[in-house]
């Protein structure tokens, strides 16, 4: 019998729910734990040290739970700290990156919209440098993720038009997982094909499972492991209490916000 495989998904806030959703679509029977650090979102303008510190706190929490793999459902966290985290932890850490390669296969003038920290990152620059014949425009959006986070968690629709740059582009790459919530608005605004990295991240999780010979399709691997959530040492583990919804457990201070948005965006649609 397979033991249950636990995947921790992290984002600064609600954006990673889009990555979680893609993972669930491809691997519906794994056990997922979601942490969105909504209280400190957005991350996109924070210093790299602060981002690393906050992401590390969440990864430590995942480690306590005995997670098998971590998915950074956050381009900013990936750009700033995936390498450092991989050096520190033994479990696999999968990042989310702008879908530069899929876009570059068919388009010559992609617009990449992302947070300032992602825009200036060496990872994005290296990714783009692999396609010297493609002319990318990287546009840092200092306020868009925050606007999406604030509006949606207050039950409102975000306004995006003021944030988006105008120019001669032939496709748009969403370089921040929050933007997937306004994908159709972005499509309407530009009338161009839109690329999103969530699916690619989910595929990397699947290939990791394949390598470990873990079945993830059509078979229930196990139920949610509540050992850590019901631990006798309440004091120490109180912060690990989660809200469970099918095979997803929402953890952290703002677990209720993420659970609410998850239900609205994915379950009840
Ligand atoms: N959702 C995140 C990303 O993919 C972070 C946005 C933010 O907190 O600024 O970059």
Image: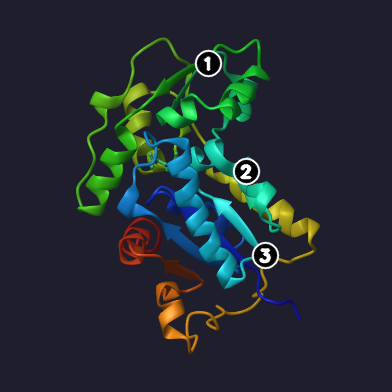
- Is label 3 or label 2 in front? 2
Disc 1 target residue: 136
Identify the residue shown where x is 46% and y is 32%.
174
- Is label 2 or label 1 in front? 2
- Is label 1 or label 3 in front? 1
Mark closer to the chain start, 3 or 2: 2
Q: Position of residue 177 (x, y in %)?
A: 44, 42
Q: CA distance from mark 1 to mark 3?
A: 37 Å
* Closest to the observer, 115 or 195: 115
Identify the residue shown where x is 57% and y is 53%.
71
Q: Are marks 2 and 1 in contact (CB under 8 Å)?
A: no
Q: Position of residue 116 (x, y in %)?
A: 41, 28
Is the residue marked 2 within 8 Å of ligand 1, measured from its CB? no
Is the residue marked 3 within 8 Å of ligand 1, measured from its CB? no
| Helix, strand or loop under label 1 | loop
Determine the image quadrant of residue 103: top right
Q: Is residue 173 visible?
A: no
Residue 217's tag is 3
Q: Position of residue 66 (x, y in %)?
A: 62, 71
Q: Position of residue 138 (x, y in %)?
A: 47, 19
Q: Is residue 73 above or below residue 106?
A: below
* Circle 2 crowding by C-alpha within 10 Å: few under 14, some 14–19, many from 20: few
Q: Is residue 31 above or below residue 133?
A: below
Q: Is residue 150 visible?
A: yes
Disc 2 target residue: 84
């Amino acid at each position: 019998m397979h033991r249950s495989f636990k995947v921790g998904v992290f984002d600064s806030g609600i954006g990673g729910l889009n990555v979680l959703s893609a993972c669930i679509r491809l691997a519906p029977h794994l056990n997922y734990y979601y942490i969105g650090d909504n209280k400190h979102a957005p991350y996109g303008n924070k210093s790299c040290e602060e981002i690393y510190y906050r992401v590390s706190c969440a990864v430590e929490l995942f480690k306590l739970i005995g997670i098998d793999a971590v998915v950074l459902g956050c381009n900013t966290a990936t750009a700033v700290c995936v390498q450092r985290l991989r050096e520190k932890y033994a479990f696999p850490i999968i990042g989310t990156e702008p879908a530069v390669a899929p876009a570059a296969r068919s388009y010559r003038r992609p617009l990449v919209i992302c947070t300032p920290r992602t825009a200036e990152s060496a990872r994005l620059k290296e990714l783009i440098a692999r396609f010297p014949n493609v002319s990318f425009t990287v546009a840092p959006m200092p306020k868009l993720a925050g606007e999406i986070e604030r509006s949606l968690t207050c039950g409102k629709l975000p306004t995006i038009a003021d944030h988006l740059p105008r120019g001669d582009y032939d496709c748009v790459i969403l370089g921040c997982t929050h933007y997937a919530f306004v994908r159709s608005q972005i499509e309407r605004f530009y009338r161009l094909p839109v690329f999103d990295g969530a699916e690619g991240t989910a595929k990397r999780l699947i290939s990791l499972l394949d390598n470990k010979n873990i079945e993830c399709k059509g078979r229930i691997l196990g139920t949610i492991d509540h050992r850590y959530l019901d631990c006798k040492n309440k004091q120490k583990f109180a912060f690990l209490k989660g809200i469970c919804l099918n095979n997803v457990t929402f953890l952290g201070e703002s677990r209720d916000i993420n659970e609410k948005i998850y239900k609205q965006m994915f379950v009840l649609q």
